Image (cartoon, rainbow, N blue to C red):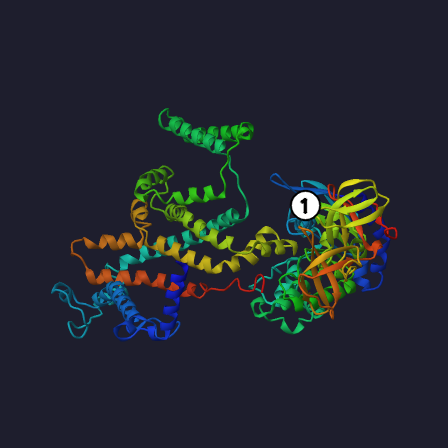
Amino acid sequence: MSEVGAAAGNAESAGNAEPAAAGGGTHARSRARRLSIRGLNKWFGANHVVKDLSLAVEPSEFLVLLGPSGCGKTTALRIIAGLEAADSGRVLLGDTDVTDELPKYRDIAMVFQSYALYPHKTVAENIGFPLKVRGLKGEERAAAVRDAAAQVHMEDLLERYPRQLSGGQRQRVALARAIVRRPSAFLMDEPLSNLDAKLRGYMRAELKHMQHELGVTTVYVTHDQVEAMTLAHRVAILDEGALQQIGTPREVYDNPANLFVAGFMGSPPMNFVRGRIENGRFESGGGGGVGVPVEGARDVAEAVMGFRPEDAEVADPGTGLFDATVYAAELTGDVTLVTVALGEDASLSIKMPKEYDVDFDRKVAVRFPLERGFLFDAATGDRLPARFISAPAG
Amino acid sequence: MRSGALTRMAEIRANLPAARARGLKRWFEPTRIGRMSPAGSIIVYALLILWSAFVLFPFYWLAVTSFKLPIDVFEGPSYLPWVDFTPNLHAWADLLDFSAKSPLAETLTPYRNSVIIAFCSTALCVLVGSMAAYALARIEYKPKLGTILIFVVLMIGAAVAVGVHGVDLWVAGAVAGALFILLARSVGRYFRRSAGNADILFWMISQRILPPVVAVVPIYMMFQRVGLLDTHLAIILTYTVVNLPIVVWLMHDFFASIPVDLEESAQLDGASRLMTFFEIVIPLARAGLAATTLLVLILSWNEYLVALFLSTTKAQTLPILVAGMNGGEKGILWWTMAVVIIIMIVPVIAMALLLQRFISKGILLGAVKG
């Protein structure tokens, strides 16, 4: 992993967390606490699932833990919740060390991927359960339940049972149960992944609005980079248990610290062309015929050139950086996605205007603004401090 | 080869509309999707009716016999009241006659014993068993095989000391217990191989592999030694232990099927482990709990062998009483026996009806996902 990139992202975004904390409910605001984890490690047998993970979530910040399945993000969340014990490292809530506290003493609420509603309890009983456990009775509890239910627009369905609710409604009940006791922090484990695409988009906006309104420190786990981009104040990207980069969505998108982050963010993800850097020139391997001058780089035997689909365009053969063959063109609605084959093993995606159409197997040129290209060291995965320059004329 | 198969398939396809069954064959094909074929339903219902008659006839026979006069019983089989014989309430009248030394007045004590023993042991068994089953479903145990071996060796040693060398039971027990704790703590950490939850579960159910008749004499001697023969406590404890494996085995599956998310959520919501168990887990497992309770109740209610050994008069249960009714100076009182058996069945049927409404499906619906 790139420690330099992670540290840089951290320092920069400390300033960025502040604007997020402005505005919103005053009551909740005062309760929001900083949540930090230090040097967290977790093994499952011989499997090192969380590797020396350190993060700080500012008060009222919405932090998204993003990574592919099996990257340790859910385990990290469960350690913060207290459902799993860390093998080493600390979990701090505000100034309190809660590493060895039972979940119920942590003042943290969690929304599960499955919602985990109690099926034998009504909506009102579900929402009221955390209060019932804490000994709140009668009208006091009922009022708090009504408030929480109103916040998620479920006040008319309090007497229903979970089985009588739709997926989106269940999701809301789970949220209401989390907010009813005004915790210091929210944890959410892929809460939208069981909803259909349309509802997911809607709930995403609602979730973001609610977090803004309540101002509760939130850690949100997902493998969906669109969710991460849209929801997060800051995104922490994990791979194989290790932190790859942390920063605002824009930072990690525009300025990826390494090959993994570059390839994970974006839909479709960044295009990669494998090759080498020799004598100030990037040359593609595999017979792609790409040759672009590079500035500020030593020679690298295995390098990767990267560029984003939306930065590139398809043009007439011979007029771009390199030529390729059209493999497929798909109209997705707002854009036409052109997939081209370069050499034997590289397949690149390029976003073109929706009016664009091209025949399969046509020879075309690909070009992108040189300042939008990235270079990585394929062996370490690290970003290279190099940039493309335009070829001398002729 | 391939084209041959294709030609054949084309032929079959062409014949499809005409291939529908005709004549006698139509009886063996469903008339509509989701129905049974006519012949099939005739066979199935015939078998069901036959089997029901076979199963229900003893109950009918019992009911009829309870209304017969002795003469109707001994004059050979008669089946239909008012046709074969005239019903008479004499056997049932005895039931209310407590004053005399009527055969039914003697049933009162065994009846009370049966109720106390069956309900107490069932309650105890289900409580302890379901908690054990829950622990086995949710917590991973790793008992060291070496430690188990030490325990067995010490137990045999204590038994030899008591039996052969005449050491006092309590002294031997205390020494063996202390030695076990000492050895388990000191040597135990060097043992590598350990058993898992599946092994513990199998060990529990394996207690039922042994025929009860093998264990019943040692059990008898045990209770004789502690002076608990012919008491409710002895039978309640024995039934509880004997039925525990069944409860653990059945409830384990029910608990394992409850999504663990629900319990973790309850934990985060602030509930303690016991509260989670009684507020969340038990209500969700109540179908299984009801079925298990009923099964254990029936087993304890009808148990004969253990009761035969452990009770003589004061703690005698109904099965022992009924079995003992085929002797005596008056000969076998079939009509009285029929009445006793009928009133013996009633509580179990009542419990079955009571618990049946809990044994419904779909209780977990809506717990997770959409």
Regarding residue A93, the answer to whether it shows in the image is no
Give whichever of A280, B280 is nearer the camera.
Answer: A280
Give whichever of A92, A193 is nearer the camera.
Answer: A193
Q: Which amino acid, by three-letter code, is at mark 1?
A: Glu
Q: Position of residue B364 (x, y in %)?
A: 53, 62
Q: Is residue A341 left or right of residue B298?
A: right
Q: Position of residue B129 (x, y in %)?
A: 46, 49
For label 1, the SS is: loop
Q: Position of residue B2 (x, y in %)?
A: 41, 59
Give the residue furthest to the right: A393
Q: Is residue B324 left or right of residue A126?
A: left
Residue for badge 1: A240
Identity of the residue drawn at 29% across and 74% down: B26
Give whichever of B264, A165 is nearer the camera.
Answer: A165
Disc tally is 1
Identity of the residue drawn at 39% across and 43% down: B206
Regarding residue A252, the answer to whether it shows in the image is yes
Give whichever of B167, B263 is nearer the camera.
Answer: B263
Q: Position of residue B298 (x, y in %)?
A: 36, 56
Q: Chain of mark 1?
A: A
Is A189 drawn above or below residue A274 in the view shown? Answer: below
Is B133 drawn above or below residue B6 in the view shown? Answer: above
Identity of the residue drawn at 48% across and 51% down: B252
Identity of the residue drawn at 37% across and 24% down: B165
